Amino acid sequence: MEVIGIFGGTFNPIHKGHLVLAETVLDTLHCTQIRVIPAAVPPHKETPAVTAQHRAEMVKLAIQDQPKLVLDTCELDRQGPSYTIETLHLLRTRFPDQALCLIMGQDSYAKLPTWHRWLELLNYCHLLVVHRADKEKTLTLHPQHEGKLVDIATAPQAFAAQANGLISFLTQAPPDISSTRIREQLSQNGEMTITDIPPRVWQYIKENRLYQKT
């Protein structure tokens, strides 16, 4: 069974850390593709000042040379909060015969009980929890997920053998790059060179005067 990665976030802006993580997941799980999904109205964060359309365009520019990374605007195309469970329900109808793997950070997994209908997630997908460099290199499972964890070495085969229901932990942390820090740098000096974002994204930010103080 093919495995499709699901990579959501505000991508405000998308940066090289996101891209390195996506490539690592592709290589580790042998995904046929990763669908990169910008959130329109993130339930757990303030809605970004930069519009969803701008953020989606930056994602498009960042991944245009990587055919296995696909921009998916499904959360931009519907009203209301961008609940992950609703996105997964939609993707399951689109990809009924593939395994879906939701990529999330270690900190997001810890807060999972605050998510809308979080206990239903594994009915639609596997979870790949990604280590953060400032966290413990062990994953504390929620009690409801006991018995679902598989070692990352066997995850490619395990995830491909069934469409959903398993969890694995990627201990290889992505580069410590922060969208928040990038926005702060840009607001302080919009003309400075930002090396943590792809050149095409940097050019788009300058042309559209994003993140600059008004």
Image (cartoon, helix red, strand yellow):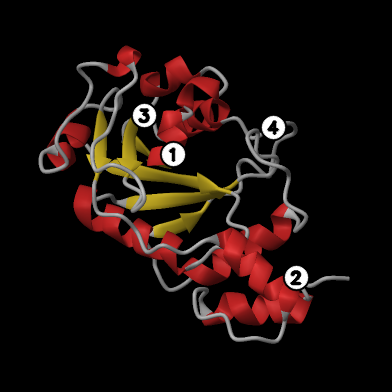
Query: Label 1: few (<14), some or many (≥20) within 10 Å?
Result: few
Which callout, 4 or 3, points to the residue nearer the camera?
4
Which residue, given by chain and number where applicable, does mark 1 sit on?
Answer: 107
| Numbered disc 2: secondary structure | loop
Residue type, label 2: Leu
Answer whether labels 1 and 2 touch (C-beta < 8 Å). Answer: no
Which residue, given by chain and number where applicable, does mark 3 sit on?
Answer: 125
Which residue, given by chain and number where applicable, does mark 4 sit on?
Answer: 81
Q: Earlier in the sequence, mark 4 or mark 3?
A: 4
**Marker disc for residue 210:** 2
Q: Earlier in the sequence, mark 3 or mark 1?
A: 1
Answer whether labels 4 and 1 touch (C-beta < 8 Å). Answer: no
- Alpha carbon of mark 4 to alpha carbon of mark 1: how far? 20 Å
Front in this rendered view, residue 105 or 61: 105
| Numbered disc 3: secondary structure | loop
> Which of the 4 quarters of the picture holds residue 107?
top left
Quadrant showing the C terminus: bottom right
> Which of the 4 quarters of the picture holds residue 164?
top left
Q: Farthest top residue? A: 144
Residue shown at 75% from the left, 56% from the top: 51
Residue type, label 3: Cys
Residue 13 can be seen in this image: no
